[in-house]
Amino acid sequence: MSGLGTAFGSGAMTNSIYEIDEMGPKDAIFAIGTNTTECHPIIGVKMLKAKARGIKLVVADPRKTDLARHADVWLRHRPGTDVALLNGLSYVILTEGLADETFIAERTENFEAFKEVAMRFTPEYTASITKVPAEKIIEAARIIAKADATASYYTMGITQHTTGVDNVLSVANVAMLTGNMGKSKGGVNPLRGQNNVQGACDMGALPNVYTGYQSVTNPDVKAKFEKAWNAQLSDKVGLTIPSVLNAITRDEVKILYVFGENPMRSDPDINHVEHCLKHLDCLIVQDIFLTETAEIADVVLPGVSYAEKDGTFSSTDRTVQRIRKAVEPKGKSLPDWQILRDIMKAMGYPADYSSAEDVFDEMRFLTPSYAGISYKRLENGGIPWPCPNENHPGTPILHIGKFSRGLGKFAPIEHREPAELPDEEYPLMLTTGRVVAHYHTGTMTRRSWGLNGAHPEESLEINPKDAEKLNIEDGDEISVTTRRGSLITKAQVTTRVPQGLTFITFHFTESPGNILTNSAADPVTQTPEFKVCSVKVKKLDFSDFGCQKRKIFRKKSSYIK
Amino acid sequence: MNTKLNSFVVADPRKCIGCKACELACAVVHADSDGKTVGTVETPIMPRLFLVKTAEVTMPIQCRHCEDAPCANACPVDAISQVDNKILINTEACVGCKTCMMACPFGAMDLVPKYKDGQVVTQNGLMSETEDGLVEKEVMLAHKCDLCVDQPNGPACIRVCPEKALELIVPKQVKRKRNVEAATNFLDSVKNFFD
């Protein structure tokens, strides 16, 4: 979001999901850092269907994901070398005369500065950094540049790095270089995870904005909200999650109110997270299940699931849709907005919303991009924002004619190595991700018979050459250790990972992947480098204490009823 | 062809996306449950087809209902036989010796615990040492694709696959269709070179 905000003026997915269904033999998809068929299966299946209709597919991923297996060109780059790879593609596009000169001249700025850096990334130089053969870089660049329309898709594979923002800016560079912005079947498309994370961001969950990305430091915006809410508001940017944790250790944050999040399993370096959360004066958790974070809370407020409340969800392509209550909440659990309203009242603020629609209407009159969306209009289907007034149909494709910030801005980006690379003590690299059966910390999916049954336990993907050196066979119990923590799991010996790289998820509480990950983060967004750290793996020896540990592990891993 | 060959379900590896909907559907229709939804099933998930997911290929593997079924020929208690063009296991006779498992070249055979009315059925004599002490061992039975013989609508896996990757092969029909196509195509080309 930060990268695209800088390049284009708006951080959201620029095009719409349905455009994939319209792609044909003259179009292309460039998927980098996204295991789409596994993590966004519906969009992934659309991509495969488009492939069957003749599009060209370029996939950049260090692992041989199912999407990579279907690609016309699979760029198997070293984790953390996305900038080099993208600069390498840009070099080929520039030197083979494939750049869209008209687009660059009329719709962008800062091109020369970017070109100066990109021109150093010859295929051979790029190959030396990324370990992708030069011919593949050239082939991929030609496909991306020559297609009538190329849509770029990315997710956490490029954002969860200390160079996350740089990686995104580089994807934007390639899209602008090839003139693939502001048109159908093109664009730069980050795929969001949760069904309403886009909505949460739109509502100002980030610490520097109000709703619709209006800045908290802007005095006109501050005045507008102070008048609407009849309250005094701060003009300072708040804290991101990593900063919150550090502030807790310095006693600057005393109370934490967590809702719909499980930091005890989804944040990196969870030993550190646990230490911080237990240091609080008061931890309040609002959730629909007793998560690992709720278990250590001082107060637990029971929320309700999607079926038990009214409201809206905003999908990854900015489409706002209604959700409608179908069943009554159980026991004393309440919709989030009611809990928050009641807390505000108890704290002395006269919050008098009587329905989710009340809240929505108050919000949209303060939010230009949502102003034209109403519950009444949503009865006829979803509306993609920006939608400034009630006669506006919504905006499926952004940046047509001009970018949100006017001109698209190129960025000159140098390659930087990840924070923690393999060394003698921790000789392998670890990357993390998801499997199709589970969602994040498994709060919901491990309580589902079918989903948990389809994938009941963790395993570490390890290349056969690495496994052989460690005397590990497929299915062996192993210990996996980083500088931050250790867990026990099974080995899955496979060539899906290249030699030197291992992969684990973060879905299983009894072997939580984030006990291993590094909290080193991107300096701008503070997104942690979940995708790269160094690890050592050892086969477990059952002649000693290791055997006892394994029995405990087995008991805990049974399906949660 | 004199005899009717057995039908079997097979997946197209070019279409399979590894979602396991087939495994879930199989487990649900064979589970001893009255409920209408998957969420009501209490017994563990025990599919009769097995998704393989490697760097090279993703597809489920299941029983081929072999004409000269090695599993049937190997079974020392004659628990496996051909019934109405399907190779089926008579679970009452099965002793769980795993000879069928060793015989099957596809790995289509599995052994699973027996459940009745949502509870596992245990053996009378054989005890097992566990961390909870000595408990009766559950009855284990051979288990493989039965072409959904008890289902009115035929194989569940084929119906749920979102990519239509699974197909029921009826050998006689496939052969006939190809013979006709080959003959028709030849007729078209022969007009060009025979006088």
Image (spheres, coloured by chain):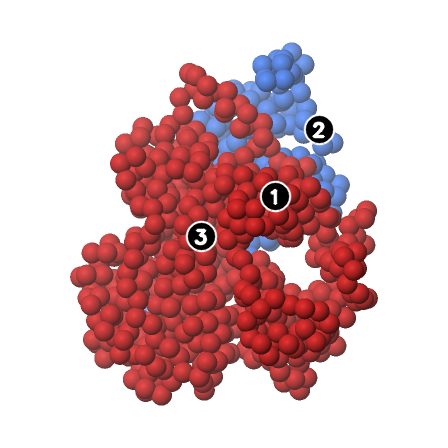
Q: Residue at x 38, y 68 (%)?
A: A169
Q: Is residue A338 left or right of residue B57?
A: right
Q: Residue at x 29, y 38 (%)?
A: A427
Query: Which quarter of the rendered picture does the C terminus of chain A lie within?
Result: top right
Amino acid type, label 2: Gln
Which residue is under mark 3? A528
Judging depth in this view, the residue of B53 and B11 nearest the camera is: B53
Sequence-first tag of 3 and 1: 1
- In percent of width and height, residue A437 lies at 55, 47
Judging depth in this view, the residue of B28 and A413 nearest the camera is: A413
Which chain is red in the rendering?
Answer: A
- In percent of width and height, residue A450 lies at 61, 44
Query: Is disc 3 on the same chain as disc 2?
Result: no
What mark, if any, has residue B119 been given in the picture?
2
Q: Is residue A490 visible?
A: no
Q: Residue at x 69, y 50 (%)?
A: A286
Alpha carbon distance from label 3 to label 1:
22 Å
Which residue is under mark 1? A280
